[in-house]
Image (cartoon, rainbow, N blue to C red):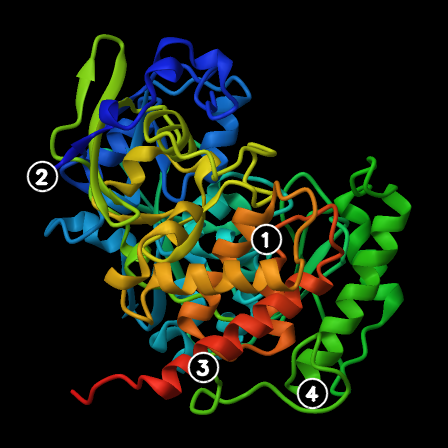
Amino acid sequence: MWRHAAMTVEPELAADPSRSGLISRSHLGIEPFALARPASLADAAANVVSGAWAHAGGIDVAQRLRDGGQAPALVPLRQAGRGSGSDLDVLTDISLRDGALFIGAAVTHARIESDALVRAHRPDLAAAWRTIGNVRIRIAGTVGGNLMSLNPGYDAAPILAAAGAELVFVDSDGGEQRCSVADRVAGRLLVGCQVPLEGRVVFDRSLKPVASVAVGDRHAAIGCAYRDVEVIELDIGADGTVDLDVLRAGLDPLGEPLDNADASSGYRRRVIEVLIERCAQAHARGGSASAGSGGGEPSATDLPRRPNAVPAGPRDQAAALPDDSHAAGDAGSVELRLHLNGEPFEAAAPASEMLVETIRSRAGLGGTRVGCDQAVCGACTVLVDGLPTASCSTFAWQTAGCDIHTIEAANESPSVEPAGSLPAVIRAVQQTFATASAFQCGYCTPGLILTASSLLAHNHEPDRSTIVDWLDSNICRCTGYLMVIEAIEAAGAALRSRSDAHPEPAP
């Protein structure tokens, strides 16, 4: 039987939500919008041309709406392209087309990193994509969202520009238009990109958001340093050397780089030169910019999936829109049905409501924190179909039909949960956090535990660098992380011990 949200909120909280810290108002300030249901690419394009916003992973869309942006409607591309049986399916497609590698606009970063076709034909692209964002960004973020936000700090644009990719757009009449990455403009529906099968790209960036550079066979693409990606021709010597005078002459027409709190324009210019030199040397020796002086790029056959690669999993295809979503007055609303900590859960919610709002105020589960409200700090992390998700920037309707676990899942009875179940893993991590004193104020702890639980559910024996990579998406101001890392290592050891004692039955 479905449990309605009203049954889970304590009466005093429902009567006066302002009295409790359980209540997040993450959707307040967002202007109401409707959810479009396109039947075809042409239909989706018509919506976008008329002013609707394309929505893929949605993190950028959520921030733009919070910042006062107004969208009459959102066009959920990942949901629309999920086995629709129409031409919308191309949005989540990776395939070989017209002698090139086609990547749909709604394909996630995690899938590009691990996709067999990408790794077989452009392993350099898979390697470059490993560096994009943190765990939550790689899970939720998409190629189209990264490109069409026109944010100069995002990495897909320089990587694809250096690779010579061609962007494919569709008109409201169904006709295709193509352009280079540098020539893309907002207000059009991106279907995907076509990447040549030949060539290599090496990508590198500064530690601070100062500059990023991708070097291809004949071009260098620069991100983060200008208003948009900039591409220059590049002549690389056989030994990887770049003539600095020629390079500087190529950079001069671009004008001065950005000058802001992150870096001065002069400093940015020097960082760009250093990154181009580094990438050019790596390109010449067949390696990656971070590979050191020896070794080369792995071949398609031996390129391993890195231990800390994010599983693409069922989330990559996205949940379907609720069947009974409807417009309620001026504000779109949806009837949600999902599974929350193993129990069916339903609620009527505005289309603008974030998942954190549903969990905290409707389900009354206060363990999911609200921190930055920008998908940066990790305090709001929950597991959606087993993968860490920023609930502050994920609309509740995006998770319709999904399995959601919060920190309260650790309270589920061990007697009814198998040893290897996700609640059991969460419980094991929680126990080692307590034993190792891997917390202080505790505000960020639920997000840390859930991120670690997702990692250990997929990999019982991660090395320390893998753990650090996953924790990059969770900010802790107290512990310094050492005890957190040790607690995760201890939890992995405990889970391995249980697996050895209770092996999975043979199929």
Instruction: Using the image as rendered, state which of residue 42 and residue 368 is in the foreground.
Output: 368
Q: Earlier in the sequence, mark 1 or mark 2?
A: 2
Q: Cα distance, mark 4 to mark 2?
A: 62 Å
Q: Amino acid at mark 3?
A: Arg
Q: Cα distance, mark 2 to mark 3?
A: 36 Å
Q: Amino acid at mark 2?
A: Met
Q: Percent position (x, y) of residue 89?
A: 20, 53
Q: Which residue is mark 3?
A: 496
Q: Percent position (x, y) of residue 6?
A: 24, 22
Q: Cα distance, mark 1 to mark 2?
A: 36 Å
- Report the disc number at residue 1: 2
Q: Which residue is mark 4?
A: 285
Q: Secondary structure under badge 2? A: loop
Q: Are marks 4 and 2 in contact (CB under 8 Å)?
A: no
Q: Amino acid at mark 4?
A: Arg
374 up-or-down from 303: above or below: above
